[in-house]
Image: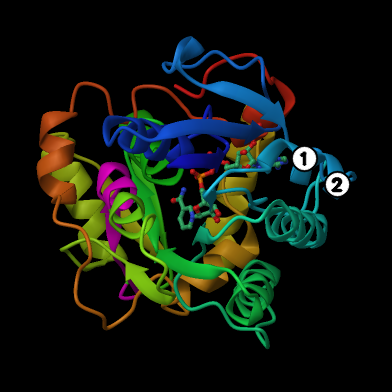
């Protein structure tokens, strides 16, 4: 098959592209960063994500069989907004339709909700609704949180545990999350790319952690002795703001904290991935959290590789 993967020089897109190439598919990418350093080298041809010109994107995708969409914007920032990402993804889907794409695999989020006050979850729900109503067959994969070498959230939790003597947990820490390994997500894409069926899969890993358990698992596997203290969410948020200011980044947003604490990164579905987060940390204990992963830098430096 001829397949376009958005953001194949990014995080999940890179693993998805590699997995599809291993299946023998011809893989191309649409990216905001065609010159970004990446492990795929010249094995993949890159085209710009030209959201303002749907016809040009359609021309690029003409004759392709499928599109895998990873494109999204994590939070609002002076340089980008979630509402723009919704419109941009809409333009991408329109281009795919015009190009005659038959199948879209779209990466979403657990528990999207059009009525949510959290823009991330509401925007994702709008895009899902659009795809469900389109003429193209669509598989929607809903991960909660994705772990792997280029991950930001879990890496930066490990970084903070390594760096500071004290770790603050937002509130009681009993809210849950279900991490999936990035290669397991890529496998789900590979399993669903060539069928013309539509469906929604909660792309969660085999383990459910409360936030308290997640922190103690990382601590144990990294062999760290750190004081962990429960703090009102606003206090925890102010601590993350200080780190964001220091690193010139956005470590986590108040909406992300609300989503996490509202159990939106948890579902009661059966696991779709098989890789253990604990086992993966054990294998990557010399790497995880050694460096801070900076989201804003990834957006402003379009040359440096994610790793
Ligand atoms: N990472 C997680 O833990 C997680 C959890 C749940 C759901 N998801 C969903 O999984 C999908 C892929 O996530 P990922 O972490 O693998 O993403 P990513 O590789 O960091 O980004 C995916 C694509 O979106 C583009 N992009 C991201 N932020 C952007 C911004 N602010 N402005 C312009 N372009 C931007 C990237 O641009 P470039 O082309 O420049 O690289 C890339 O093409 C997303 O839809 C996300 O919502 C991720």
- Judged from the image, the quadrant occupied by ligand 1 is top right
On the image, the x and y values in percent for residue 193 come to 39, 55
**How many marks can you see?**
2
Q: In screen coordinates, is 285 left or right of 59?
A: left
CB of mark 1 within 8 Å of CB of mark 2? yes
Which residue bears the numbered disc 2?
55
The answer to whether residue 248 is visible is no
On the image, the x and y values in percent for residue 232 come to 50, 69
Query: Relative to the observer, which residue lies in front, 229 or 272?
Result: 272
Q: Is residue 112 above or below residue 188?
A: below
- Gap between marks 1 and 2, in whole Å? 6 Å
The answer to whether residue 255 is visible is yes
Q: Secondary structure at mark 2?
A: helix
Which residue bears the numbered disc 1?
59
182 is within the stretch colored magenta: yes
Q: Within 8 Å: ligand 1 and the Cβ of disc 2? A: no
Q: Secondary structure at mark 1?
A: helix
Neighbor class of circle 2 (other Cα within 10 Å; few <14, some 14-19, many 20+) is some
Q: Where's the C terminus, which quadrant?
A: top left
On the image, the x and y values in percent for residue 65 come to 52, 49
Q: In screen coordinates, is 67 left or right of 285?
A: right
Q: Which residue is at 30% across, 56% downward?
A: 188
On the image, the x and y values in percent for residue 19 come to 31, 36
Q: Which residue is at 68% across, 88% downward?
A: 115
Q: Which residue is at 11% across, 35% downward?
A: 282
Query: Relative to the observer, which residue lies in front, 280 or 252?
Result: 280
Which residue is most to the right? 52
Region in magenta: 174-187
Q: Where's the N terminus, which quadrant?
A: top left
Q: Is residue 84 above or below residue 258?
A: above
Q: Which mark is residue 125?
A: none
Which colour style is shown?
rainbow
């Amino acid at each position: 098959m001829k397949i376009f993967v958005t953001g194949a020089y990014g995080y999940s897109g890179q693993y998805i592209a590699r997995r599809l190439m291993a299946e023998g598919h011809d893989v191309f990418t649409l990216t905001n960063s065609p010159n970004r350093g990446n492990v795929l080298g010249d094995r993949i041809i890159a085209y710009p994500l030209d959201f303002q010109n749907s016809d040009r994107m359609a021309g690029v995708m003409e004759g392709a069989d499928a599109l895998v969409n990873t494109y999204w914007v994590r939070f609002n920032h002076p340089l980008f907004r979630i509402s723009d990402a919704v419109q941009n993804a809409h333009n991408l889907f329109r281009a795919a339709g015009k190009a005659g794409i038959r199948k879209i695999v779209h990466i979403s989020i657990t528990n999207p909700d059009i009525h949510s006050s959290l823009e991330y979850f509401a925007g994702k729900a709008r895009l899902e609704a659009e795809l469900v109503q389109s003429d193209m067959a669509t598989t929607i994969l809903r991960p909660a949180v994705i772990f792997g070498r280029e991950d930001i959230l879990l890496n930066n939790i490990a970084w903070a545990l390594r760096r500071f003597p004290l770790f603050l947990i937002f509130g009681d820490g009993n809210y849950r999350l279900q991490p999936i390994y990035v290669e397991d997500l890529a496998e789900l894409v590979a399993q669903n790319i060539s069928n013309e069926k539509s469906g929604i899969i909660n792309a969660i890993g085999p383990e459910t952690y409360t936030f308290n358990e997640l922190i103690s698992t990382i601590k144990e596997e990294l062999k760290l002795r750190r004081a962990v203290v429960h703090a009102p969410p606003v206090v925890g948020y102010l601590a993350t703001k200080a780190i964001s200011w220091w690193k010139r980044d956005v470590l986590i947003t108040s909406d992300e904290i609300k989503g996490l604490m509202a159990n939106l990164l948890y579902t009661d579905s059966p696991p779709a991935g098989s890789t253990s987060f604990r086992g993966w940390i054990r294998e990557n204990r010399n790497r995880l959290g050694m460096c801070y992963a900076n989201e804003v830098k990834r957006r402003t430096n379009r040359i440096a590789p994610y790793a």
